[in-house]
Structures are given as C-alpha cells and as structure tokens.
Amino acid sequence: MNMPIRNTTAEAAYLQAGQAMVVSPARRAAFDRFMASGLPHRRMEDWRWTDLKQLLARPFPPAAPVLTEARTVERLVALSPFEGVPRARLVIADGVYRPELSELPVTAGVSVRLLSDPTPIDADDPLLLLNTAFFTGGLKIEVAAGENVTLPVEIVSVNSGERAESFAPRIEVAIGDGAALTLVETHLGIDGSYVALPLTLAMLGAGARLDRIKVQEDAARAYHLANAHIDLGAEATLRDFTFTIGAAVTRNQGFVTFSGEGSDARVTGSYLLHDRQHCDTRLVIDHAVPRCTSREIFKCVVDEEARGIFQGKVIVRPNAQKTDGKQSSHALLLSPTAEFDAKPELEIFADDVICGHGATAGDLEEDHVFYLRSRGIPEDRARSMLITAFIAEAFDDVTDERLRDGLAARAEGWLDRQRRTADAEGMDSDG
Amino acid sequence: MGILEIKDLHVKLADEDKVILDGLSLIVRPGEVHAIMGPNGSGKSTLSYVLAGREGYEVTGGEVLLDGEDLLAMEPNERAARGVFLAFQYPIEIPGVATMQFLKVALNAQRKARGEPEMSTPEFMRLIRDRAQRLGISPEMLKRPVNVGFSGGEKKRAEILQMAVLEPSMCIMDETDSGLDIDALRIVADGVNGLRSPDRAMIVITHYQRLLEYIVPDRVHVLSQGRIVKSGDKSLALELEERGYADYGRDAA
C-alpha cells in the first residue's frame, strides 16, 4: 500500500467523507486512486511550487448538493465581466447546475444536458481524480457537426462562500466536425474560503473550432484548482485564454492533445496578482501527430508579495514531424517582493520540428515611463497605461471584441484598485 | 510667455563621477530659435535630457528658470504642462499604446494640469487629422502603437506631429536631422517652420549645419566640453561647417 503514513487535516476530511460516499464504481476507483497518494506536494516535480499538503491548511469536505438561495446566486452572477454581452448563460452555483437561473442557447445545433455521472478518465492527476470522486454536478454541451454557434455560451460558476467545502463541477464539451463554439467559463466568488475543483473536458472534431475564455475571480480566501483536458481532431482550431484575478491559491492545469493532423492551438493567459496570491499554471501540450502548431503565451502582472508560476511542457512524439511549438511567459513585477517562476520543458522525439521557448520577468522600462511623462502624462497614469498595454497584448487572442472589452475593463479595474492601495499606503507613510 | 534661463549649469552622471555640463549659461526668449552645435560628447543630449527631466543626471550647480520658476524642481510631466517639449533623438517605441490614444491622454493631462477643460474626442480628432495631414502622416499610422515599426524618418515626423498637437512654448529638438535623407529632412523642417511663432521658442540641437539651412536660427552656440564657448548669428554655423570643431575641443568631428 502506498497510503501516506499520516494524513493532513484536509486529506483526513476527504478520506472520512469519501469512505461514507455511495457512488459508482468508477468514482469509487478515482477516490481510492487519489487517496493512495493524497494531496500533491513539493517533492512531486510538477507541484514543487504548489504544495497542497501545506497550502490546504484546513478541512474542506466534499460538498453535498445544496441549492443556494437564488437571490445570492443572482447577485454573484451579475458580477460577470460579460454582463450586457449577448450570450447564452448557464449557471452553476456552489457546484450545482441551476436551470431555473440559466438561459439556454437558442441555436438548434447546440444541446445542453445535465451531466449525471462524470466520464471516467484514466489518469493519475490528483485534481482530475478529486473532480471525479467528489463530482457535484455538471453539464454536457454538444454542438452538432457543421454548426457555427455565433453567440458565446457562458458558464458562470459562482460560490457563495457560505460553506468551507470542496466543489467539483464538470463541463464536458463535444464539438462536431466543422462546428464552432465560443465557450466562456466565469468563476466568481466574494466571500468565504472554499475549494473550487472545476474540470473542463473538450473534444474537437475534424475542422472544429473552440474559442475558450476562462475568467477566474474567486473569493480572496478561496482555492481554485482547475483542470482542462482538450483533445483536437484533424485541422481543428483552439483559442484558449485564461484570465486569473481571484483566489488565494490557483492551480490551472491544461492538457491539450493533438489527435489529428494539421491542427492549431493557442493557449494564452494573463494573471493579475497582488497581496499574497499564488497562481501556478501547468500546461502539457502533446503533439501526438504530425503537422500541428501550438503557441503558449502568458503575460502576468505580479504586485506586492504575490507569486506567479508558469510551467509549460511541449511533448513531440516520435512520429509528430513538422511540429511547430513555441511557448513564452512574460512577467511584469511591480514590487520587489513579487515573484515569478517559469519552467519551460521540451520533450522532443521527432527530428523535423520547430520548437522554442522564452521567458522574461522584470519591471517596466524606465525609458518608456519617461517618454510618456515627457509628454505631460503623470507618472501613475503613465505606469498604468504601460501595464494596460502589456496586458492588452495578452487579450489579442480573444477574437470576440465584446468579450475582449469585458476583460480589458476588468484589467483597468484591477489597476485602479492597485493604484488606490499604493496611494493609501503612501499617505500612511507620509503621516 | 516662456523665458528659459540656464545659469551656470553643472551636471554630472548620477552614478559615476563624470562631469558633462560644466558651467553652461543660456537665455532663450519667446519667438527665438537657438541652435546648439557641438562635437559628439560635448553635452548636447545631456542638456536636452536635463531640461526635460530625465533621471540619471545630478545637477551639482547652477539653476534653470522657466518664467522665473525653478524648472529643475518640476516633474517631467509638470514641465510638459508648462510648455517644455523634447523631440527625442531616438524616439521611444511603446508597444500596445496607439499613437492617437497616447496623444489624447497627453494633451488632456496637460490641459488638466493647466486648469483648462479637457478636449472632447471629436475636437481632438479634428486637431490631430489636420496636423497629421500637414506632415504627411497617414491616419493608419496614428492607429499604430507609438513609434513601433516606424522608419527613422517616420519616427522624427511623429515627434514633430506630437509637437504640433501639444503646442509647447519651449521646443527642444535633439538631433532631429539625424538619420534623415534630404526629402525627409525637408518635410520635418517644413513642419518645424510652420510652428515658429512669436510665442514659441526653439532650441535646435545638431551636429551638422545642414539642418540650419532649413530651420534658420536667430542665434548659434557652440558647445564644447560642457559649456558654451562661442555664440553668434547664423553665419557661425557656416563657419563651423567649413572649419569643423577642431578649434573647440579635443573631440573634433
């Protein structure tokens, strides 16, 4: 037995609840597999910066499906950065789908069904196993072949923060051959401490396209431990953008697999972190077949004592010739105590490929700041213009202009808050 | 308004003991165009940066007054709002900030600092289109990020466009002619001449006399080893062209 000798309090809570659960054999198996190794920790290479044994310092038992009061849910849903943008909107509150608060897509070729039991996946990933074992509810979205869904479908996952529990919703998406979907996943919370364990599974058929935009603004004391598994058929297109502002601890895992030739994936993102926030992105891009292109670009702004991490791995399988895979991460550090770590990995087993990676971290260029000031722009405004410009480049991959505007407004709001905090601290030290 | 008085200015690099300006004095009155010429390393660019407020320099003596007020005590953006404008020798590229937006923010920041009402977007659009047209700058270029991907000539023209939009009273042009072919030089010089007015003073810093054929100065000063060693009218520039800087310091051009 590989059972840890002593469980942490968080693990003990999972163990106790898990043993009492009445679930399908598949979910039972996922639970047993998770408990065999427990929460991931720093001695595991992929988790060296995000030791959940230490970070999850208290029990967060798996949530029972409870219907949170509609008014509370609606108040949170209204905080979406995309309010006012025409879209279908599906609401998941405290891990439970709320059809009565949702607006379904009206396009005939799209079906949305309640996911009664999660599709089992054979993997050792602890977050995937937890999501399967403690699954609280979810949706299956299917787009018929050839259907171009013009209005975005937003899935708003809100957490009321009323219960310190683990919530494990799941979205399973299947996009038929030649079909296209813009999927927006918005995670919102204001109060309390909880663990969000969302999982997104997406399968793209031949020639299909998925534009996926994920925004995470969970509560300041929340944990957001997310997985996305995306599989691309031949000649498919993926545009995946993740925007992280919220939660105390964020782990975003993305697994993109090229299963058909000639596909193109851009996985991009941005974090805006302050206080002691921690955000760790782990991407694995698997070029399993020839002639696919992948780009990963992350642009992050880190202030105060926050810490950003980017771990990107590109695997090129032996037969995956003509692969073109590049990744880069760029961090703007706004305080001397902010930190950013980048770990690019390339595992290349084919010889006719183009692969590369790059990483930068630093402050704004003083020459840029001076140039703006020399034209009459006050220093704080000059700095925020330059930071906005830095982040805006990350938004370039979001092709829907209205969605991009929603993101940009959020970034502006974040910068304003940071500036006000800095001003207030300046006044404190003056007095 | 806009009398600039530089009195016995001494400047060294902030992080090393290298004296660059060593007792420079100059008075520039509204409407006047002064040319400052000198060999490489004589302190021309430092003078422009110190007047604009760039960090990295330490003033060890003397003073600079703008309308009787201590210019060196002002932040760079305050100086801009008071009418000081530096056309950079090497204009900085600012990725992600569109030229149009940049100029609108700059203009309104200056107006706000002066207690003037902000300019509306349509009003601003009319202004910038008019000024851009005169300098042969396409509307397409105004949408591009500031100086990013501009040729050398386009960058210099963009600097003059900024000057034309911001309408400063004290223009400092640092080697605006460098890197320009004769056609580009003519366009830039026409742009500058169009901005000459009784309320506006200009300091034209240049290594070569060529620019002064197009922008004819009222006064010419020779800068050498951090101070003005000779002043005269425009004929001094021609004299320098013939004889070089050999008479004025070790770093002869």
Image: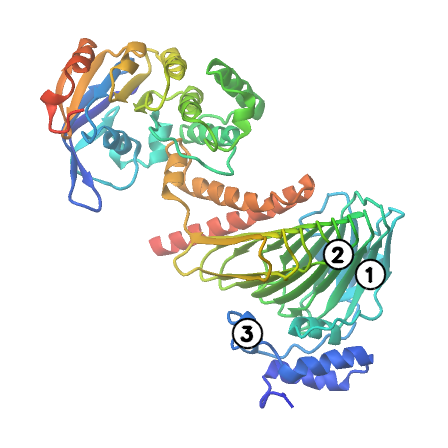
> Disc 1 marks which residue?
A140
Pick the residue in front: B38 or A391.
Answer: B38
Q: Is residue B76 left or right of residue B118?
A: left
Question: Foreground mark, 2 or 1?
Answer: 1
Residues behind callouts 3 and 1 on a single chain: yes
| Residue occupying the point 26% across, 23% down | B67
* Dot placed on the residue nearer the N-terminal end, 3 or 2: 3
Q: Quadrant of the N terminus of chain A?
A: bottom right
Residue A75 visible, this orientation = no
Please say if A49 is above or below A203.
Answer: below
Q: Secondary structure at mark 3?
A: helix
Q: Nearer the viewer, residue A204 or A17?
A: A204
Quick check: marks 3 and 1 in contact, CB under 8 Å? no
- In which quadrant is the C terminus of chain A drawn? bottom left
**Disc 2 target residue:** A74
- Answer with the quarter of the image where residue B68 lies: top left
Marks 2/1 in contact by CB < 8 Å: the verdict is no
Label 1 chain ID: A
**Residue under label 3:** A55
Q: Amino acid at mark 3?
A: Leu
Q: Amino acid at mark 1?
A: Lys
